[in-house]
Amino acid sequence: MNKRALITGVTGQDGSYLAELLYSKGYEVHGLRRRSSTFGTERIEHLIFGEEPKLQLHYGDLSDGNGLMRLIRELEPDEVYNLAAQSHVRVSFDQPTYTADTTAVGTLRLLEAIRDVQDDTGKQIRFYQASSSEMFGKVVETPQKETTPFYPRSPYGVAKVYSHWITINYRESYDLHASCGILFNHESPRRGETFVTRKITRGATRIKLGLQDKLFLGNLDAKRDWGFAGDYVEAMWRMLQQDKPDDYVVATNELYSVRDFCEKTFSRLDLDYRKYVEIDPRFYRPAEVELLLGDATKALTQLHWKPQTSFDQLVDMMCENDLAMAQNELLLTSGNAPSSKRSAA
Ligand code: NAP
Ligand code: F7E
């Protein structure tokens, strides 16, 4: 019998790659979507339409514990991947209570639903929690690994620490097969457009085609360990295939600054970023995370996982996608567009 998986956050960047991966492995894939006035399914359209949809969607929200309970009871999934969250660090300073309710307590609601259904039916439901390198925040050692103490610097980071520890607590208290992936930043052509990498590749390609003049950014000196989202969802799946649940750092162990990302992207388009990038203090954060660099040795030795995509390849694929989007946009403004749809790449 095929395994059945439920992905929360399936409409997001990681959810879309994970749904593809699980389907390719023969899973019956289900996803949670929240109600919105627009479709919001751009990243998964190729999976939900057609004669035999590869992904079945269910309405639900991490703020609605009863709905989560009903869904888990109805599906009795073998694996649940909790990727849903208010995931934007800057926004979490504007919406701290909402972020805590979704990104922290939402995980507890889901764990409670799993615990209840597992107790009632005896079926083991494996659980993956999307923990984050943001938990390391003002880092106390470099590189950061599973044993590095947390020092979160945003309401988002604090909420993720809660989710991380409540997942471990449920594992230890109720014998749940629950694992946390402490993922460092990972990007793709499907990355939300307000995260810095995508903002840069969108902005630079639009500048290249004359669709905008300037790109306004915040702290160019922040340094991150950026990988490719398509590689990272493989690590999530591997965690749930282990006999014993555990927690793992997933990272590339390479460090670049936001300025490096600008330099690389603009020069790929034969542009000098210094002519186009301007600083806008609105994009600064009340408390910044200056540096995140991960040590994924444990994932390498125990999961046999390592990143497959280099930093240059990542920048290339994002630029290529966004250049095509900008070209489409240009055609639209001239009235000759072949399609008004955004790329689902
Ligand atoms: P993303 O693109 O922002 O996707 C977030 C997903 O959560 C979307 O599907 C969103 O739905 C959904 N969501 C938000 N609030 C919800 C709610 N109240 N109820 C149900 N669903 C809700 O994030 P991502 O980059 O794919 O990241 C996936 C997970 O990994 C997140 O938990 C994130 O915090 C964590 N993480 C990400 C990174 C990274 O670098 N990408 C690193 C470490 C950890 P809508 O489409 O309707 O908005
Ligand atoms: O910022 C700086 C900003 O928003 C990266 C989420 O997926 O990864 C992500 O969080 C850096 C920060 O990602 C702009 O100050 C400069 O230092 O792309 P970001 P993030 O905050 O690291 C972690 C691991 C997650 O878990 C989160 O869910 O770039 N920066 N100028 C800027 N950032 C943004 N967004 N916009 C700017 O204009």
Image: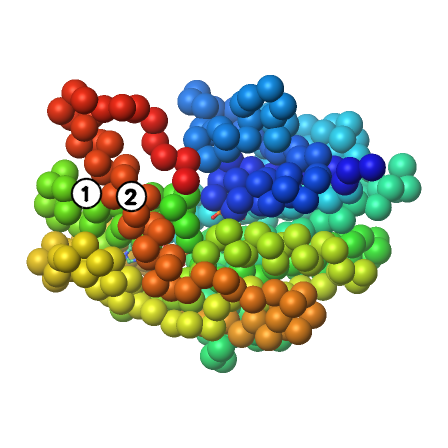
Residue at 81%, 60% (x, y): give it.
243
Q: Earlier in the sequence, mark 1 or mark 2?
A: 1
The location of residue 247, given as percent across then percent down, is: 67, 64
In the rendering, at what x and y percent does residue 134 appear? 48, 61
**Spatial CA span between label 1 and label 2:** 8 Å
Q: Quadrant of the C terminus?
A: top left
Residue assigned mark 1: 206
- The amino acid pointed to by label 2 is Asp
**Which SS class for mark 2?**
helix
Label 1 with label 2: CB-CB less than 8 Å: yes
Q: Residue at x 66, y 73 (%)?
A: 301
Q: Residue at x 11, y 41 (%)?
A: 210
Q: Which residue is mark 2?
A: 322
Task: Pinpoint residue 8: horizontal percent, then vertical percent.
Answer: 60, 39
Q: As displayed, is residue 77 above or below residue 272?
A: above
Q: Nearer the viewer, residue 62 or 275?
A: 275
147 or 64, nearer to the observer:
147
Between 80 and 68, the one lying in front of the other is 80
